[in-house]
Image (tube, rainbow, N blue to C red):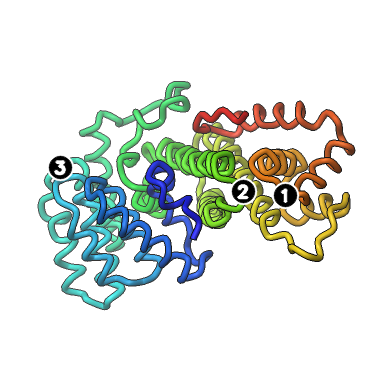
Amino acid sequence: MSPILSKRHLVEDFTDCFDFIGDQLSKSLIQDILSEYEKIWAEDSESIDILYDCESLLALLRDHEKAITFLDQIDGEYGSGMRMLRRASHYAGLNDKEGVKKSLYPLFSHPCNEHEKECAFIAFGRLDDKVSTARVWKELLKEKELENQVFHEEIFSNPDSYNCLSHLHIREWNEGVRLLYRFDIRENRDIELYALVSMIHYQVGIVYNSIIDMIQNSGPYEAFTGMTVALAISTGALSWITELRDMVTIDEPKVYQELILNLEGVRKYQTFFTIGERLLTIPTTTFQPNESFLHNLVKETGGDVYQVYTLLNLFTEAGNDTDYEHLLDILLNLDPDIERKAMMRREMDGYLGPQPPFDLE
């Protein structure tokens, strides 16, 4: 398969993103990615995040027994509560009620640290125990000195300093925020929502940067598998934020505005990956580059002509495919000023929420 997910610095860019994928990729592709990750772990067993990503891939494959073995390889306090929650989910998938009970018992009886208490909040929510869930949440806010917060500008520029759940991985973070709205626990929940949605947008942006990096350094075809995985990640992320938009009632109007902006930001990434995948699967013998193809590409993907230009420009600079060169020439004839406009559009995307820095040249 494409080496994009076997290069260590790129693997790190995909960290904690596989939970977005859902059922959008084939089992064979997920298994291929898992095999690559297992090789990386065998060569360098220092990165705990690799084990968490392997567990996420195994969760997608519903291989609960193997997922538990990966969780069992993680030592120390880091993520101890998340491991309990994840083991419980896998034991539930195996219909092992005793395993579920054993996994969650320490969270109910004596959470050892702040992290485990955050996970206890989620564990009580899974039991549908609204009273205990609300009690633990109130205790967390008090211990972190986050009670009775009033919205101010610093919260929007630095939400991680004002929320409880951002130290969790994205799966548990999302579950925790949903619990706040499901049980109508209102204190601090809008801040938690804003922090989560902002981070989802930011994480998809990191994946976007990885794809650009791969195209520039290895060529468009080497980026194909990564583009496919990135499309699945961004589609799942878009679905998560859309579900949140449709379920929540928000007390602070600006949080809702920011949710919509970040939703659009993730959608832009998703359409970029969709266009990229379509361009990389152009038929080799029957394709005729023409203006009609470009119009249909924009219409069918929901993207825009500036994204098409950006991808074609990247593809032609990194490779020598004449079809891409012809399509780029057609675009430049249609709008000789498209390069400047595309740059302006990229700057405008910064208004859609936080983005990781990247110098696209």
* In the depicted structure, whether residue 131 falls above or below residue 335: below
Number of residues whose C-alpha sits closer than 10 Å to that of mark 2, classed few (under 14), some (14–19) or many (20 or more) = many
Does label 2 or label 3 sit earlier along the sequence? 3
Can residue 184 be seen?
no
- What type is the residue that disc 1 sits on? Asp
Percent position (x, y) of residue 41? 27, 54
Name the amino acid type tagged 3. Answer: Asn
Q: Of helix, strand and loop, which one carries label 1?
A: loop
The answer to whether 309 appears left or right of 257 in the picture is right
- Point out the frontmost of discs 2 and 3: 2
Q: Position of residue 210 (x, y in %)?
A: 50, 42
Q: Amino acid at mark 2?
A: Pro
State yes or no: discs 2 and 3 in contact (Cβ < 8 Å): no
Separation of marks 1 and 2 at Cα, in angstroms: 10 Å
Return the mark for residue 177: none
How many residues crowd around disc 1 within 10 Å: few (fewer than 14), some, or many (20 or more)? few
Which residue in the protein does label 2 denote? Answer: 220
Question: Residue 94: x percent and y percent?
Answer: 27, 76
Q: Which residue is under mark 3?
A: 113
Q: On the image, numbered disc 1 is attached to which residue?
A: 321
Image spot of residue 108 (x, y percent): 16, 56
First in sequence: mark 1 vs mark 2: 2
Q: CA distance from mark 2 to mark 3?
A: 46 Å
Secondary element under disc 2, as helix, strand or loop, is loop
